[in-house]
Image (cartoon, rainbow, N blue to C red):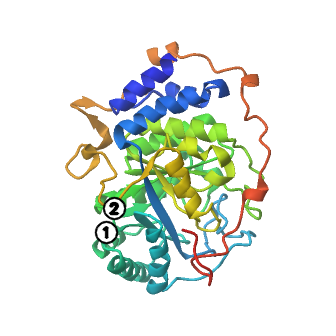
Amino acid sequence: MDLLNTLVEKGLRRELPSRAEALAVLATSDDELLDVVAAAGKVRRQWFGRRVKLNYLVNLKSGLCPEDCSYCSQRLGSKAEILKYTWLKPDEASEAAAAGVAGGAKRVCLVASGRGPTDRDVDRVSKTIEAIKEQNEDVEICACLGLLSAGQAERLREAGADAYNHNLNTSEGTYGEITTTHTYADRVDTVRQAQAAGLSACSGLIAGMGESDEDLVDVVFALRELDPDSVPVNFLIPFEGTPLAKEWNLTPQRCLRVLAMVRFVCPDVEVRLSGGREVHLRSMQPLALHLVNSVFLGDYLTSEGQAGKADLDMIADAGFEVEGAGTTTLPEHRTPGGCGSVCADGAPAAVPEDETGADAAQEPPAPAPETRADAAPAPRTDLVTVRRRGAGTDLAPNA
């Protein structure tokens, strides 16, 4: 396909595709799916080889959030029967993190429910970071605590945090339909605060909330402009007891198209396969490794993932290797002193975002609906399992 050849060439040069090209990836047929994966895989291997970075979540405080994010089992008014507990002590969090590091995780992500941290919360998390790094000096720490206030990002950086996560989740145009207690602009501001403080920015999306192809392209293009180092791609886990419990819009094929589109738009960033992969990709998870270069090991915040050993076996069986602690994840041009993804060998990274340009005119039309297999996915509610082990429990974590 001329489209895929063009996208590969742009990805190898770190050039931004046109919006029409990104939409065309999402519109490809199932017959073309392996071609799409192979093309995006060339871009992935150019910048990351066959390495897979492992990340491990520690839920420091679960449930009872005052925000109303429709996708979240911890939201205000959620009836999901999840674990609810207040802050883990630093030694408890360190013990939980150690299990992930022992399983091969290079980064530990410290997450807490809530609108955003108080200054006391930042002190608490700072002590937790110190406790983890005393036991595992080389581990990367990413904090995810909600909306930041002035000076908090700097304090986390001084405490030893390496990164900060705050996802955009969906497009600016539809954000108000998903969340009303804060704005899309609030999220963008927090990511920019983290970047200004010298933290590596991590910001991604959730697919499967009923959004259109245009919404998906909008949020991924916004992420490209924001230029985080890591882009986690989550697939909605429709928890019973949340407003989106009936949103079963994804198939494995759809998930792979979304991941491929993200890789073409963000060719040289850490694209992370995140929550919902077991529920929606299922047996096709190994194919996703050709598109992403990072995954979460084991369980998530309030849901259980597949066994950590199964993750490691999957990576090895697919011909990939776990990225070691001594390896720099990002390409050299994205490390401090590099030019990031916004420049390319002296040429501007972005092309005009004119959807009526020549690129759009040359693209093939979308395939007829009958060639698609994702029109009526069968819900797999049996694969949504509430986390009952690890942090906040007396049971051993999954790592």
Residue 2 has which mark? none
Residue at mark 1: 138
Q: Amino acid at mark 1?
A: Asp
At which x and y percent is residue 40? 47, 33
Location of residue 372 with respect to 392 vertically, above or below: above
Residue 31 left/right relative to 3: right
Nearer the observer, 222 or 92:
92
Residue 325 has which mark? 2
At which x and y percent is residue 120? 42, 83
Q: Amino acid at mark 2?
A: Ala
**Secondary structure state at the residue bearing disc 1:** loop
Which residue is at a point 44% across and 80% down the rendered structure image? 94
Is residue 15 among the parts visible in the rendering? no
At which x and y percent is residue 136? 35, 74
Q: CA distance from mark 1 to mark 2?
A: 7 Å
At which x and y percent is residue 167? 50, 55
Which residue is at a point 45% across and 21% down the rendered structure image? 5
Location of residue 103 with respect to 258 vertically, above or below: below
Residue 339 left/right relative to 90: left
Nearer the observer, 23 or 373:
373
Upstream in sequence: badge 1 or badge 2: 1
Callout 1–callout 2 Cβ contact below 8 Å? yes
Q: Quadrant of residue 244?
A: bottom right
Mark 2 surroundings: few (<14), some (14-19) or many (≥20) residues within 10 A: some
Nearer the observer, 368 or 277:
277
Is residue 62 among the parts visible in the rendering? yes
Mark 1 surroundings: few (<14), some (14-19) or many (≥20) residues within 10 A: few
Which residue is at a point 59% across and 67% down the rendered structure image? 301
**Secondary structure state at the residue bearing disc 2:** loop
For the C terminus, the image quarter is bottom right
